[in-house]
Amino acid sequence: MPAELTRVLAVDLGGTKINAAVVGLKGEGAPHLGPVATAPTPAREGANAVVAAAVNVAHEALQGTDGDGPPLAAIGIASAGVIDSARGVVTAATDALPGWPGTDLSGAFHTEFEVRTRALNDVHAHGLGEAMFGAGQGCNSLLLVAVGTGIGGAFITRGQVLTGSRGAAGHIGHVRTAGVPGVEDLVCSCGRRGHLEGFASGPGIAAELTRRGTPAASTREVADLANNGSRIALGTLIDAGRLTGRAIGDQLNIVDPQVVAVTGGVASASGVAGEEWWAALREGVHESAMDAVGNTPIVPASAGNHAALLGAAHFALTDPATEG
């Protein structure tokens, strides 16, 4: 008997943008992503304003469907911050979303839409989307590493994301790093010193190039300089890629995933900049990983720009703790 279509409203709530769409899931088939509604995140207006904006975007996504098909089965929310997914509550967040800790995401959406609602960290959701519908298809486990404004990670095994006891698992950007002069003294976004994110994230790379005497405001500027012949810019990207690779190699030694998918703005750099960053990343992996795991495939993520929406939808239906 053919599997029935299940419709889930998925929301991806980030520090700068909110996306929402209705996702159709049908057995083992490919998901159907409906029209994506989007709006800027009113981060500086406080948590209540952000939740209200997200609810409005969710309504817009529902209005973008044709009204056919079964009713909504669930809502899945992917959000920036550390999320206690058992309760759907934000427990910690950076200053990008002032007042975000304590926000009851599941409660707010359940009250508004009256269907069961689940929330999880956005990188965890991205990892689930990648594991189920991208590079992890056919694999038992996947490690996602996202290198952009920050550096995050998610480990997925047998269709379930490892969230940790507090929802904080996967913060690969917050491991100590070394190997580049001065990196141990750099202040990370979390306030600690010497973390990978402070050097190898997008803002970290731009700041490092500036420290080396070539001002840059973004990773795109660094990549453009590298692609136009700046050896200093290219060297900065290579150093960042190598240290990121070492951190990935460390994780291979710990969780032994079947595949690693890398995503984010830094990972998508084009031209020589991207090629050399990827080459350095793979070199760093082999410097750090044991022989037993050193041949783990390291590939670009392939689930698309809205992998977090797909992952949030999957989580809303399959998480064991999901209740009404």
Image (cartoon, rainbow, N blue to C red):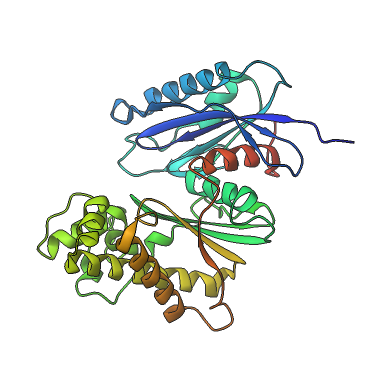
Which residue occupies the foreground of this view, 287 or 75?
Answer: 287
Name the residue: 58% across, 28% down. Answer: 34
Quarter the N terminus occupies = top right
Name the residue: 85% across, 35% down. Answer: 2
Tell me if residue 176 can be seen. Answer: no
Q: Is residue 41 above or below residue 196?
A: above
Q: In which quarter of the image is residue 112?
A: top right
Tell me if residue 91 can be seen. Answer: yes
In this view, the residue farthest toward the left is 213
Q: In this view, does 301 lie above or below 39?
A: below
Name the residue: 66% across, 15% down. Answer: 67
Quarter the C terminus occupies = top right
Name the residue: 69% across, 38% down. Answer: 317
Q: In this view, does 148 lie above or below 118?
A: below
Locate residue 313, reporting x and y percent. Answer: 62, 37
Q: Quadrant of residue 119?
A: top right
In this view, the residue farthest toward the right is 1
Which residue occupies the foreground of this view, 5 or 177?
Answer: 5
Locate residue 226, reporting x and y percent. Answer: 23, 62
Q: How many labels does the image show?
A: 0
Say left or right for 218 vs 54: left
Say left or right for 64 vs 236: right
In this view, the residue farthest toward the bottom is 291
Q: In which quarter of the image is residue 117?
A: top right
Locate residue 231, reporting x and y percent. Answer: 18, 69
Locate residue 29, reporting x and y percent. Answer: 73, 42
